[in-house]
Image (spheres, rainbow, N blue to C red):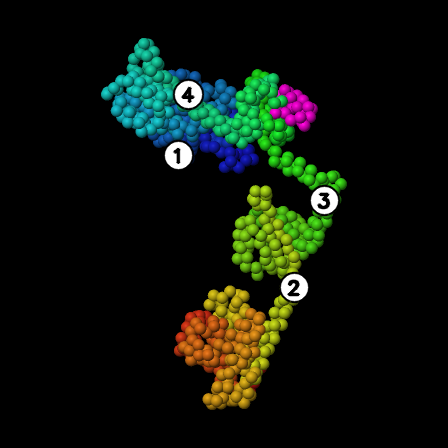
Amino acid sequence: MVQGLQVPKLELEKGSILIIEDSMMFSKALKKGLSALGYHITLAHTLHDAIHTLIDHSFDLIILDLNLPDGEGEEIFKNLDIFKKLKIIVYTSDTDKDRRNEWFRYGVLRYLSKSDPMTFVFKEIDTVMKSLVENISYSILLVDDSRFICRQISELLQPRNYTVSIANDGKTARELFNEKIFDLIILDLELPDTTGEALLIELRKHQQSAKTPIFILTGQYDASGVGRLIKQGANEFFLKPFIAEELLLKIDFWIDYERTSKQNLYQHTILQEYKDAVDRSTIVSRTNQKGFITYVNDKFCQISGYTKEELLGQPHNLVRHPDMPKAVFQNLWETIQAGKSWEGIVKNRRKDGSHYWVSAVINPIIDQDGTIVEFMSIRTDITSIHNIHDSLKTQLKISEESFEDAYHMFKQYENAINVSTILTRTDLDGNITFANTNFYTTTGYTEAEVLGKNHSIIRHKDTPNDVFTDLWATLKAGKVWKGVFKNQKKDGTAYWVNSTILPILDKVGNPLEYMAIRREITEIIKLHEEIESTQQEVIYRMGEIAESRSKETGNHVRRVAEYSRLLALKLGFDKQEADLIATASPMHDIGKVGIPDAILLKPGKLDDAEWEIMRTHAMLGYTILQNSSRPLLQAAAIIAKEHHEKYNGTGYPLNISGANIHIYARIVAIADVFDALSHDRCYKKAWEDEAVFDFFRKEREEHFDPKLVDLFLDTKDEFLAIRDSLKDTIYFSA
């Protein structure tokens, strides 16, 4: 940051300047003034300090005093081959004009005297710095057969950042100005293949160089020749050997003139574009000091129904509507004659007698002497708005009393919404701009903690990111989003809301804000969860009843449920469907309740007749469950019927194979067999883990779906973890 200024460095600094000055008074004054203009200033008080500073650092400009305590500042000039591309302003009390010309030959940009006012010095330095930036885009063509002169002028121009092109003959010059446009041309009268005068005439015939400043260099002065060259378009003349300061000052003058001309042209173009934009979009007229119309645009003619010929020379009374009070126009006229702007709503009359309304701004146009030369009126058509106003006034006949009644009703509706719902409004970035009392009561937050924040302060970790992605996509499309959120209060307690979030649009459909209306449904959700939990418990108990009849273990159905859930998720099912499979799986053997104990509890191998009876439990289970309309029991019916089918088609009860076996049943088949092999049964002991996995490898594509087997074996550690977390606590003797 520049010392003493409370502004960020990057905002103000425009360049770096080294001030080489032994006087503390002048150096401090220069630093203070130039720092205030935004420049970064470094001070050196001796020649020794200056040289060491220049070795270690680079600067955009050097301000140099020639009289230093340990040497002459001109030593810097003599070492320009070391300190390349230095930009120097001499600031000295030395008034020797011959020395000044020598300084400019070294490439000095400007000479400033210590007797000059400091405000002038600051302004000149600032002008030089700005010119250095702007000069990069300005090109100069130098045409001279003397390579010494070309090098001399190029070295003078290089510190000023001009782009210089050199031609030593007419042919090269023609090639160059046919390739690019130059901002200034320096032309020697004597060239090896043509004359400078012939080239001047040729340049002035070209459109791109017709107005380019052209300087003439000549070794001899001829008054008649100068007059002739002026007529042919020459701007300046220099007699060799030229004075460097004079040449540089005139180059800078003409380049500045070119720069100012471009800026004026740009300003003129911008003003014309503004005028055209106003003419296209508004109703414009101008009048003289007496109020007679001198100009109208097309929109004025279109809305009034009059032609330009009918309007010019007439007062605005021509379009005045009789409904408008005279006092309005009296006030208007007094205001603008006092040199002030007048604004108001005016009802006018068209040529056909119909009316139109305008919002008008009338400005006096004042010259440099403070005299009003004309008045300009810019109007906007607001007829449609006033027509709606008149229509409402006529059709609804709203009196002040009835309006108050309507407003009272509105406030009651607003209160009803506030009392019954949780309501928030946000800006387009989702930051909360309003929340009603119910929001604060429900969440436990205060207004200070909520306003300006987004809804993430109440977001519960259980709510997936996909929900919010869908929400924002819907709102950005201008549509209403509806859904259920699990949110979190300030104290960490979870609560549920049924939400409707909608964009509030302006009359052309652009969103202004978003409004969220919520109804808390925590009690309903808890009741639903309790019902689901009870239902789940009933299903587990039913499954356990079937298993307990065959002396199976108590946690078998719970493990099968968790295995099934895990395998379904690994296969790519979403959580909802994986939960459905897990919940339905405990009833896979529900049909065993219909199998006689003598067969079900037989410790040895079943004979063929007994095996046929045992195999009927699959269809028995399906028969028990098939008529339910509940998705859960429908899934359980499918699993009960098909979980003993084999992938190769040798299973039962239907001998179906492959993808014809429902995926739910294929999943539960692996879960059921894995748990059966891993635990003691009335007819066998538990297998070792590796024997179980070898069995599944062997039965891949035979008994079991190969893809499911691969998933099972790839994640067997997770299955073992479930098994170990749900160990049996009750055992039945065989």
Residue type at mark 3 is Tyr
Disc with the residue nearer the chain's start (3 vs 2): 3
Which of discs 4 and 2 lies nearer the camera? The answer is 2
Give the residue at x 65% y 62%.
522
Q: Which mark is residue 407?
A: 3
| Towards the viewer: 135 or 151 | 135
Give coordinates of residue 19: x percent, y percent.
46, 28
Disc with the residue nearer the chain's start (1 vs 4): 1
Taking 400 as reference, is 169 above or below it? above
Give coordinates of residue 609: x percent, y percent.
48, 89
Q: Which residue is mark 4?
A: 253
Residue type at mark 4 is Phe
Which of discs 3 and 2 lies nearer the camera? The answer is 3
Distance between the alpha carbons at the discs numbered 4 and 2: 85 Å
Magenta range: 319-341
- Residue 124 lies in the magenta-colored region: no
Residue type at mark 2 is Ile
Marks 3 and 1: in contact by CB < 8 Å? no
Disc with the residue nearer the chain's start (1 vs 3): 1
Disc with the residue nearer the chain's start (2 vs 1): 1
Q: Which residue is mark 2?
A: 524
Distance between the alpha carbons at the discs numbered 1 and 4: 34 Å
Q: Secondary structure at mark 3?
A: helix
Residue type at mark 1 is Ile
Distance between the alpha carbons at the discs numbered 2 and 1: 80 Å
| Towards the viewer: 495 or 269 | 269
Which of discs 2 and 1 lies nearer the camera? The answer is 2
Give the residue at x 54% y 52%.
474
Horizontal side of residue 420 vs 254, given as left or right: right
